[in-house]
Image (cartoon, coloured by chain):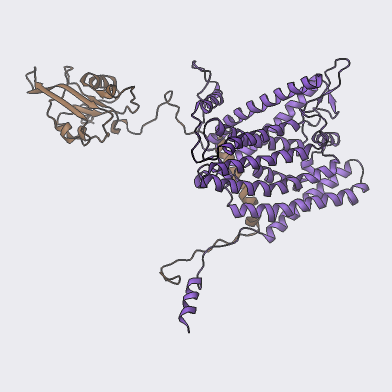
Chain colours: A purple, B brown
Amino acid sequence: MWILLEALIKITVVIGGVMTAAAYLVLLERRVAAWVQDRRGPNRVGIPLTKIRIFGLGQPIADGVKFIFKEEFIPGHVNRWLYVLAPMVMFVAAIVLFAAVPFGHVDLGIDGWEPIALVVMPGLDVGIVYVFAVSSIAVYGVLLGSWASNNKYAFLGGLRSAAQLISYEIPLGLGILGIVLVSGTLRIDGIVQAQAESGVWNVFTQPLGFVVFLVAAFAEAGRLPFDLAETEQELVGGFHTEYSGIKLMMFLVAEYLHMIAASFLIVLLFFGGWHFWGLTGSEPVAGIGLALLRILVLLAKFMLVVLFFMVARWSWPRFRFDQLMDLAWKVMLPLGLVNLVGIAFWIEYGRPQFTGAAEWIVMAICGWVLLFLSWLVTTLVSPSAPDNRPRLGPVAADLDAKEAASP
Amino acid sequence: MKPDDKNIKWAEEPKLGLAGKSYLPLIAGGITTTLKHLVSPKTTVQTPEERHEMADPLGYRGVHRLNRDEQGRVKCVACFLCSTACPAHCIDIVAAESPWPDREKYPQSFSIDELRCIFCGMCEEACPVDAIELTSLYDLAGKSREEMIFDKEKLLSVYDQTKDAEPMRTVREQTEKPS
């Protein structure tokens, strides 16, 4: 009974917090986008019916109200069942991800109470596997939506999105396998705990895995420079072309939730979760004050990663689709494998020979050397997009004509 | 045109060096540009609190006004040159016999449909007595089409509103001559 109540409270807090965060991160994204373009962004909507502005913080409410009250138009040519189902699938798949994001353990100091794990699903042994399993369900949302829309643009967007999401699942997993090997656990809170105890975040020792995971996470979240699925210039809106009203909002929020989840995963797996040197300690269970501090540290790191997502959006041009696929299969997949094999070698042959701090220093050096070498090899081999530029020389049509003319 | 035509220029892709192939300078360059713009001064003008700074408010073609003479009467002599010149046919004048001795006619009513106006300034150029002029007011808005048809009183009030900032052309030319 108490467990049920506890779970309900956690679910409420997580869903409420995540949805609010999504709404306000949209505002932040619009402001950052405006700043990057030398504009100011939405800064006028404040408290309704007053002239108080508070930096446009009322904008998400206005956006939400607008989406809810807009006409929800279902075109006549769609497959109604799948059309209605798709945004739900995508939204649910995006939000259940957060059930596995741990914020640490808190001991409330009340007699007879166990320490409370600040995660909806405590003690989830398959943590990372669960995250990947759930996040790949989002592909179904995209596919269903694009197929049910019965529209060529939506269909092309859906095809691209499906190919992209499935391709980048593999580097995403490979980027993490090294961490799983080193930490010896699939539990996300276990991985955070391992980083806190050693005081060495995984990004320092496994930079190659981080690069692979970061690129794959961008692609999984469908953010620029990998937003091929909804390129406005060529596909109108991609898979959500035919959607309007609150269904469109569910799609857009789900995509945003993917970005939030990716940011949380990057922080938890590579940047030590709630750990910060000399500030949060490294015990698994904390008192109320320390637990709050840990949550703040985690959220601060999360905000930095989200800001990087937003700034990255305006920094680099979008990939062409064949370049995107090349990057996944010819660059990121081999690099992920190299990282995995390197870590496996290290654990089998390298680690037993060192103790204490030397172990981590040598591992970090090896990791960075591995990153440098593999990047160099990638550069030299350069499996970039094929050069299909027209050149001077015999054209196929000319050769055909000559062949036809000669007896 | 054949592929080996002399007029075709064949462009070659620039050859990338090791640095270019590694993408690192491009990644760094992209993020530097973004960060530079993130903190650079913003160009947005916050209307209505701030106003656009016009290089030449006197040359701007905004809302019309009907000028007054020294005695505060409307300067217009109802010659219809402006409404004849107007390509959008937005000026409507009803002339009447002038109550004053210095001219024959005066406009009994003078209305401009600001929604039809294309702000070309030809009325201003056509006017022989500098009675109609375009001001630098650009933010005109109304809640109905009727409201946007400016009558004589409204156009004269625009003059009262803008005469200090933007003196009439005749006044300007008089003051500019001595210098």
Q: In the visual, does B41 lie left or right of A162?
A: left
Is any atom of residue A312 visible in this view? no
Q: Position of residue A142 (x, y in %)?
A: 61, 41
Residue A27 in the image, given as x and y percentages of width and height: 57, 29
- The residue located at (9%, 20%) in the rendering is B98
Could you say which quadrant of the image residue B141 lies in?
top left
Tell me how many marks there are. 0
Q: What quarter of the picture does the N terminus of chain A occupy?
A: top right
Q: Is residue A350 visible?
A: yes
Residue A308, image x and y in percent?
64, 38
Q: Is residue A382 left or right of residue A345?
A: left
Q: Quick check: A36 above or below A48?
A: below
Q: Quadrant of residue A373?
A: bottom right
Viewer-nearest residue: B18 or A192: A192
In the foreground, B169 or A158: A158
Report the front residue among A361 and B89. B89
Q: Is residue A289 placed above or below A258 in the rendered structure?
A: above
Q: Position of residue B66 (x, y in %)?
A: 21, 24
Residue A128 in the image: above or below residue A398: above
Where is residue A206, by image quadrant? Answer: top right
Q: Identify the residue at the far bottom of this view.
A: A407
Q: Residue at x 29, y 32 (%)?
A: B61
